[in-house]
Amino acid sequence: MHGLRGGQAAGAPPQYYAPPADAYQELPPETPEMNLEPWLDTTYYQEALDGFNIYDPTLWLPTIRFSVKGMMFWPWFLISLSTFLLAYDLLSLHPEHVDLIMMPLTAHGVLGGALSFLVVMRTDTSMNRWWEARCSWQTILNNCVSIGCQTAPALPTAAQTEQMLMELMAFVLCLKAWLRDTTVQREEIGPRMDWNYIRRLNAAYCPPATALNRLSHTARQNLPEKLGAAIYDETSEALREMNDMVGACIKIKRTPMVFSYIATLRTFMLLWLSTLCIPLIGDFGWLAVPVSSLIAFLFLSVEQMAVEIEGPFGNDANDLPIESFLIDLEKILLEMTPVFL
């Protein structure tokens, strides 16, 4: 345990204050009332988190889902319907024609292996984009904490320290909104955030770049002369790295998968799934309908998953839960405010 502070008697029980983070900080017996009003609207962000898939990977049942929705519904429905109609025609109306479709599944098996390889490559590429976006955001958050730990406390006044911490939160807010093609809304910020400052950032062509510029200006204008050069060099390096990560996010956002690859994959997939029912009906009869529907579901659901994680900055269930990142960052930065310390 940390040493006793504030002249607390050795035999007296320590007093604790529960901050927004998941920890207890030992405080002196007489602690002044703290103003820990948030920069974010906690209710707004908690409700936004409900739309993301946040799960326990050790549990199986919550992760098993059979959902046909979104872009995969119509291809799956048409393939299943066409298989049923063809089976009804050949098995019920014209059973004498069944011999015409008695063919081995070898050709479709070989083509299915090639299709599976293309689908795996597609999914792997999308997952790499998702992971690069996650790493970029983590680097941004790490540098925000670094500036909050090293630069903000070195500013001469408590107001200037508070201003820099607020500008750090404003930067990540604007980056989140900009990557989602929107602006920061009034209802998502808390009483501690300067709404007029947010409005000026919203009006910029590239709000994240403008926010980084303001952070650099705040540090350069307010750091003390004796420590200014050394600390500003470290701050500049952190801001440069944050700018690089913003660029990485822009690259992911504005560079979709190559059109010819997606067009070839989807055309190949639909042709294969549409013709697979012919040999299946010849070999399995009515059982071909659920088998064909299940195979179509598997391939189309993987393609839909790849599409969702290809652009990881949105509000889809499998996108990055950026709201969670911002909530955690706010808890850390609030403990660096002058009123907390």
Image (cartoon, rainbow, N blue to C red):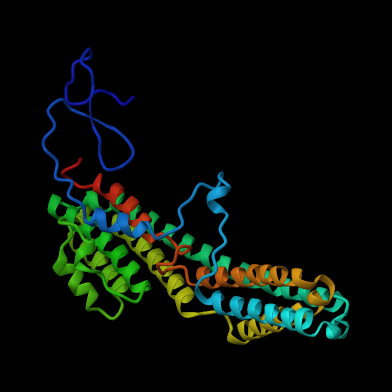
Which of the image's four quarters has the N terminus?
top left
Can you give x and y, in whole percent of width and height, for residue 116 in the image? 72, 71
Is residue 323 shown above or below 82?
A: above
Q: Nearer the viewer, residue 249 or 162?
A: 249
Left or right, 79 with reference to 275 = left
Answer with the quarter of the image where residue 99 lies.
bottom right
Q: Nearer the viewer, residue 91 or 37?
A: 91
Left or right, 118 with reference to 315 = right
Left or right, 128 with reference to 170 = right
Q: Nearer the viewer, residue 16 or 289?
A: 289
Q: Is residue 52 visible?
A: yes
**Which residue is at a point 70% across and 79% down the rendered structure image?**
83
Can you give x and y, in whole percent of width and height, for residue 307 in the image? 54, 73
Residue extending farthest to the top is 11
Can you give x and y, in whole percent of width and height, for residue 274 in the image? 70, 82
Is residue 325 shown above or below 311?
A: above
Is residue 68 shown above or below 91?
A: above
Q: Is residue 230 visible?
A: no
Residue extending farthest to the front is 93
Which of the image's four quarters has the C terminus?
top left
Answer with the quarter of the image where residue 118 lies.
bottom right
Can you give x and y, in whole percent of width and height, for residue 106 in the image? 87, 75
